Image (cartoon, helix red, strand yellow):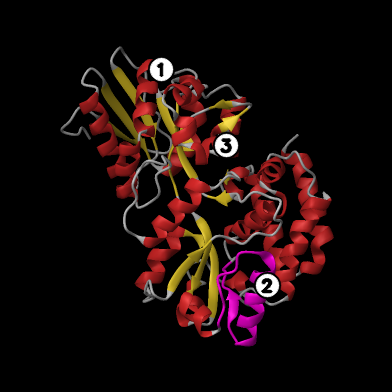
Amino acid sequence: MVTKFKTTIAALAASTILATSAFAGELVINTDTSDPAPKAAFEQLIADFEAANPDITVKWNLFDHEGYKTSIRNFLTADAPDLANWYAGNRMLPYVNAGLFEDVSDVWEDNGLNDSLASAAGSMTIDGKKWGVPYTYYQWGVYYRKDIFEANNIEVPTNWDEFKAAGATLTAAGVTPITIGTKYLWTAGGVFDYLNLRTNGYDFHMALTKGEVEWTDPRVVETMNNWKQLIDAGFFLENHTSYSWQEALAPMVAGDAAMYVMGNFAVAPLREAGLTDDQLGFFQFPVINPDVPLAEEAPTDTLHIPANATNKEDAKKFLAFLASAEAQTKINEVLGQLPINKDSTVGDDKFLQAGYTMLSTTDGGIAQFFDRDAPAEMAKIGMEGFQEFMVKPDRLDAILARLEKTRLRVYK
């Protein structure tokens, strides 16, 4: 369709690629932001940019999610747009290594982004250079039943010993400390990520997901042994392999479980199920190694200039516009997520406020989530191993050996 302002939106099927060649004054943007909220957010963003830059017309090619994943490498190589959305961290690494994304360190330097977008700077940096601009993320952490904690005189734990003690108190009261559904594996990946980030730190975690560290490394074993402490103490919901992440919300709603290591998207269904904000709280995953800076899990959406783009000058203007506090405030109001610019404003929702404070002040780095940071095959086999470990922790050596075998094959 063609909107009533200057932007053309072309809906692309999975097998379709539009010609994206730009002419002077035209800026071509490819995105997969086809869900209602992201689509509305980009419509507003583009309209605002065009209003501020009347000499530039935006042509917006809108893909469905699956079509985008299968098309992006082709259009980056053959007929590149001027901008394309993607994801931070190791998810952008293949395109950086292939020379398909443009170094935009100058955009960061010229617009003070190393300060205003500092929380996500690490996840946008490869080989000391910046390869795109982040515009939204959302926090992970521990969502918990405040009323259950209060009834059992449990303070919010800030370190490993307090966390394990809280679990012991809950177990003694007949409450499962942590609900989880690992039927679709990725929830176990989130638990692993936090345990590894807290045990070994962001740089080690990124090196592991990039295939630079052996899975049999003693530091990985230490992470798994920390996990085993929780498993042996009965921290996790029984029969969790039978439940999706949504189904695992039910024990928390019923008061049979007290915590969930999860992303902020869990808040809406918990509220819809009847939990009030007086009952529901959030805290940062506790410290395990006090010498390790606190890194967080916050999947981050990004915009990039393809190396083969035609109109890089206007593309850089768009990136600078997208990075501004005002633009990030507006786009995230629509998305219901968090702006990265530290000078943006966040709505009154207490969980968004908590996430924004936590992510804006972190000094340990921002991880993207295991199935974004690791290649697809490594992520799949890794998360299968995590699920198996949660059920049969005595198989640790065999699981890590299998993951190491996978690493040697996937990253060669």
Residue 38 vs 279, above or below: the answer is above
Q: Indicate whether residue 12 is drawn in magenta.
A: no
Tell me which label, 2 or 1, sits earlier in the chain. 2
Q: What are the residue bounds of the magenta stretch?
A: 153-181
Q: Residue at left 58%, top 83%? A: 175
Disc on res. 29: none
Q: Residue at left 81%, top 68%? A: 394
- As measured in the structure, the alpha-carbon distance from the residue carrying label 2 to the one carrying label 1 is 52 Å
Q: Is residue 136 left or right of residue 329?
A: right
Disc on res. 312: 1
Where does the C terminus fall, quadrant-wise? top right
Residue 45 vs 382, above or below: the answer is above
Residue 336 position within the rendered picture, expressed as x and y whole percent measured from the top left: 35, 52
Q: Amino acid at mark 3?
A: Gly
Disc 2 designates what residue? 164
Q: Nearer the viewer's eye, disc 2 or disc 1? A: 2
Residue 50 position within the rendered picture, expressed as x and y whole percent measured from the top left: 24, 26
